[in-house]
């Protein structure tokens, strides 16, 4: 069965997350987005785990469903009908590790997947004495990542550990500010137990393929969403049975007929793609950063080194190399962002969402609209520029000012029309 899975999100108990990150609202958004399997996020948090036990019913195959789904207050969402078998949940969490190793402070985020509440409870019990699991949905533990993996293997052997958003500068395996130069340097003799890596919003598989040392790992993508409307912005498309075991087996033994592709941001849109200094509005390529000796040309302070620079530093291949057997990917732009571009409005304004839900009601779900629905069908709905924007996205005709130092990149699907518009404005003066 072909389905979309987004395995890394957060609950309302994580910092800087929406209060709407609850199971009922997430189920509605999962159907709207076209997601069949959604991570719960934050299973280490006692209150969220309590709610999960109340709301989620085990299927018997490592996934869960909502037997009773309470319609949200949002009128756009209430216009849909969501059945229990429309979306399944997998128990997941992200944990932040801050510790010292080999004379440096390390800050690593790890994603954990689990098949049942017994596994979750055993792992939580093993971690309870190390840090405060109540403080945040994504707890911070002063534990070496290798030692954590050792605990997982001992107390929760059916769980899976995946290094999260591996290139993010501040909190990741390869982060420029607090990471490592290799996976072996982090996990040492336990490295063989790591088989998957999460690319993160600021990189896509083609960037990761430049490191031959990563060839033996499967690359996954997830949204890391903090609000319901952002789930699925990155995800994985499988063709397997709907079960924890089948999904994990596919990650361990990936093949193009089982793991069809990953859904990716255009990496330039990610918050840390290029180097920069946001307070000075400075955006630099890796080559430019080297010319400025890693210092901001405006204020002289140290630049935040982005993902592209870090990839360049560790890469042993040129751009464009595709190692054999690699899972393909599709760079997509969220539908509401395309509509915002097409209408010249904010992607989050009410009129954009009205158009968005008109498309969803007509064609089924967002993933299908972005990847499968023929353009001639999409063009039947107004405004027609939406279908034109989707066509340009599918062709990769995208103009992006790269993200940097925590600022998302800015996409422009209609750059030549912007030039015409600006010249017409000039004529008025």
Image (cartoon, helix red, strand yellow):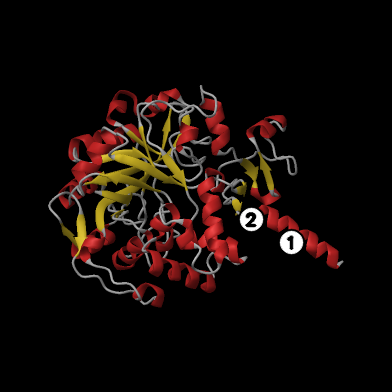
From the top left corner, tell me how far across and down residue 189 is, in percent: 30, 23
Q: Quadrant of residue 157?
A: top left
> How packed is label 1: few (under 14 Cα within 10 Å), some, or many (20 or more)?
few
Which image quarter is the C terminus in? Answer: bottom right
Q: Position of residue 48 (x, y in %)?
A: 28, 60
Q: Give the residue displayed 27% in from the left and 30% down from the top.
A: 193
Which residue is outermost to the right? 429
Q: Secondary structure at mark 2?
A: loop
> What's the residue at 59%, 48% (across, down)?
398
Q: Quadrant of residue 145?
A: top left
Q: Nearer the viewer, residue 344 or 375?
A: 375
- The reply to whether residue 129 is visible in this rendering is no
- Which residue reaches farthest front? 376
Q: Is residue 159 above or below residue 133?
A: above
Q: Residue furthest left?
A: 60
Does residue 185 sit above or below 422 in this rendering? above
Considering only order in the chain, which callout, 2 or 1, is on the residue closer to the N terminus?
Answer: 2
Q: Are marks 1 and 2 in contact (CB under 8 Å)?
A: no
Q: Position of 11 compared to 301: left or right? A: left
394 over 25 or under it: above or below: above
Name the residue nearer the viewer: 53 or 315.
Answer: 315
Instruction: Tell me where residue 142 appears, x and y as whole percent.
Output: 37, 41
Q: Is residue 27 left or right of residue 208?
A: left
Could you tell whether 19 is left or right of 288 in the image? left
Asked if residue 126 lies left or right of residue 268, the reply is: left
Image coordinates of residue 249 in percent, x first then y, are: 22, 37
The residue labelled by disc 1 is 421
Q: Which residue is mark 2?
A: 414
């Amino acid at each position: 069965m072909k389905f979309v899975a987004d395995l890394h999100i957060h609950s309302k108990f994580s910092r800087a997350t929406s209060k709407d990150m609850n199971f009922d609202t997430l189920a509605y958004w999962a159907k709207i987005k076209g997601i069949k399997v959604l991570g719960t996020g934050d299973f280490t948090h006692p209150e969220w785990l309590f709610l999960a036990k109340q709301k989620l019913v085990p299927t018997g195959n490592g996934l869960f469903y909502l037997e009773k789904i309470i319609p949200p207050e949002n009128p756009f969402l209430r216009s849909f009908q969501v059945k229990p078998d429309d979306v399944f949940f997998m128990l997941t969490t992200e944990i932040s590790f801050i510790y010292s190793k080999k004379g440096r402070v390390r800050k690593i985020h790890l994603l954990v997947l689990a098949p049942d509440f017994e596994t979750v409870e055993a792992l939580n019990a093993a971690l309870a004495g190390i840090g405060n699991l109540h403080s945040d949905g994504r707890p911070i533990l002063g534990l070496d990542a290798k030692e954590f993996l050792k605990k997982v293997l001992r107390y929760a052997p059916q769980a899976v550990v995946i290094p999260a958003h591996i290139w993010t500068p501040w909190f990741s395996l390869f982060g420029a500010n607090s990471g490592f130069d290799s996976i072996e340097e982090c996990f040492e003799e336990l490295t063989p137990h790591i088989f998957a890596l999460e690319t993160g919003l600021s990189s896509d598989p083609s960037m990761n393929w430049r490191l031959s040392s990563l060839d033996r790992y499967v690359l996954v993508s997830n949204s890391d969403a903090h609000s319901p409307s952002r789930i699925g912005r990155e995800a994985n498309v499988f063709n397997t049975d709907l079960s924890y075991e089948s999904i994990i087996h596919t990650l361990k033994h990936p093949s193009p007929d089982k793991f069809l592709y990953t859904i990716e941001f255009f990496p330039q849109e990610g918050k840390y793609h290029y180097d920069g200094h946001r307070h000075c509005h400075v955006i630099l390529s890796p080559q430019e950063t080297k010319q400025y000796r890693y210092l901001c040309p405006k204020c002289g302070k140290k630049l935040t080194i982005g993902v592209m620079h870090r990839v360049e530093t560790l890469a042993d291949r040129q751009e464009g190399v595709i190692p054999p057997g690699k899972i393909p990917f599709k760079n997509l732009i969220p539908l509401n962002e395309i509509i915002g571009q097409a209408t010249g409005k904010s992607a989050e304004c009410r009129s954009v969402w009205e158009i968005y839900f008109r498309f969803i009601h007509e064609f089924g779900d967002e993933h299908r609209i972005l990847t499968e629905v023929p353009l001639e069908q999409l063009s039947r709905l107004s405004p027609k520029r939406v279908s034109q924007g989707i066509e340009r996205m599918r062709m990769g005709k995208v103009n992006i000012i790269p993200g940097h130092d925590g600022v998302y990149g800015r996409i422009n699907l209609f750059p030549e029309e912007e030039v015409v518009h600006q010249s017409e404005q000039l004529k008025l003066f």
